[in-house]
Amino acid sequence: MQIAGPSTPKNLGNGEVYPKSTCFLTEEVIKALVSHGVLFTLTAHDGTTGWKDQLSKEGLVWTPWIYTEEEKQKAIARERELPEMELSRFYWTPSWSVKGEAKLMFPVIVKRTLNSRNSAVNKVN
């Protein structure tokens, strides 16, 4: 799992400094960041979040991606066709958090790109 945060390292006041990208996001790191009110995003692979299983479950609502006018104009200028994309969201809870004193829930956003053969290519963010 990877964490992306502020552009400069964050000193949490206890001598711990977390850089912009911490490749090994552990329970200790998540708890430290949350306890100090640090805003961050997670990029997690399927082995950590199980997002592929979530996609197969019913109840996910897919919302069409809406391109900006600027994106549309750039595509026209480059003579490229913009792909059809959709977004969905679910919540992931670290397994250690379920057993802990406070259950943490992180939103996971999945973007899927529909290719010309109508099959979806999914990417989690």
Image: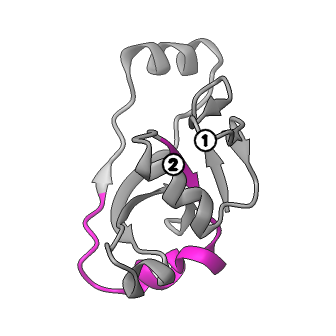
Please name the residue shown 72% across and 36% down the image. Answer: 19
Q: Is residue 117 above or below residue 98?
A: above
Measured as percent of width and height from the top left, residue 78 is found at 65, 17
Q: How is the image coloured?
A: one colour
Using residue 55 as the reference point, say whether residue 15 is left or right of it. Answer: right
Furthest residue to the right?
Answer: 23
Q: Position of residue 27 (x, y in %)?
A: 58, 69
Q: Which quadrant would the N terminus be assigned to in this image? A: bottom right
Name the residue at the front extreme. Answer: 14
Q: Is residue 54 magenta?
A: yes
Residue 46 occupies quadrant? bottom right
Q: Is residue 114 visible?
A: no
Residue 84 counted in the magenta span:
no
Residue toward you, 88 or 24: 24
Magenta range is: 40-62
Q: In the picture, residue 17 is in which quadrant?
A: top right
Residue under pointer 2: 33
Q: Is residue 53 above or below residue 67?
A: below
Which amino acid does the dot numbered 2 rest on?
A: Leu
**On the image, numbered disc 1 is attached to which residue?**
14
